[in-house]
């Protein structure tokens, strides 16, 4: 998904990030920390496509999972909070 996102092929990126997310969900516990990266990446792709509500949902799920797995000063939480903030800032949400 990441390569397709870099090439601005957002629909393909979305497809592969969703596949990865579903694979992770099928083999990992529901709040496994691996899910935060995929959810953040998928949220960025949704944002690039103008699907801001979907992006926010991904970011909120990523943040909830990161709160379970990391301390409040962990980089993963900061990145997710930044994604939410940028979404609100750039889209007037």
Image: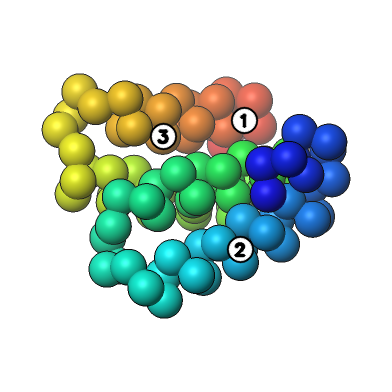
Please tell me whether mark 1 sits on a helix, a strand or a loop: loop
User: Which residue: 68% across, 49% down?
Assistant: 1
Q: Nearer the viewer, mark 1 or mark 3?
A: 3
Residue for badge 1:
92
The reply to whether discs 1 and 2 touch (Cβ–Cβ < 8 Å) is no
User: Which residue: 57% across, 32% down?
Assistant: 87
Q: CA distance from mark 2 to mark 3?
A: 18 Å
| Above or below for 11 versus 81 | below
Q: CA distance from mark 1 to mark 3?
A: 18 Å
Q: CA distance from mark 1 to mark 2?
A: 26 Å
- The image position of residue 60, as x and y in percent, is 40, 48
Of the 4 image quadrants, the one containing the C terminus is: top right
Please tell me whether mark 2 sits on a helix, a strand or a loop: helix
- Lower position in the chain sequence, tag 1 or tag 2: 2
Q: How is the image coloured?
A: rainbow
For disc 3, the neighbor class at 10 Å (few under 14, some 14 to 19, many from 20) is: many
Of 77 and 9, nearer the camera is 9
26 sits to left or right of 71: right
User: Which residue: 27% across, 68% down?
Assistant: 29
For disc 1, the neighbor class at 10 Å (few under 14, some 14 to 19, many from 20) is: few
Of 86 and 68, nearer the camera is 68
| Above or below for 4 versus 80 | below
User: Which residue: 84% across, 45% down?
Assistant: 9
For disc 2, the neighbor class at 10 Å (few under 14, some 14 to 19, many from 20) is: some
- The image position of residue 67, as x and y in percent, is 22, 43
Residue 80's disc is: 3
- Lower position in the chain sequence, tag 2 or tag 3: 2
Residue 18's disc is: 2
- Lower position in the chain sequence, tag 1 or tag 3: 3
């Amino acid at each position: 998904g990441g390569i397709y996102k870099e090439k601005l092929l957002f629909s393909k990126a979305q497809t592969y990030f969703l596949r990865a997310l579903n694979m992770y969900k099928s083999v990992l516990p529901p709040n496994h920390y691996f899910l935060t990266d995929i959810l953040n990446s998928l949220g960025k792709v949704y944002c690039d496509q103008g699907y801001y509500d979907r992006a926010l949902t991904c970011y909120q799920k990523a943040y909830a999972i990161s709160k379970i797995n990391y301390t409040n000063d962990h980089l993963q939480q900061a990145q997710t909070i930044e994604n939410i903030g940028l979404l609100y800032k750039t889209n007037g949400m």
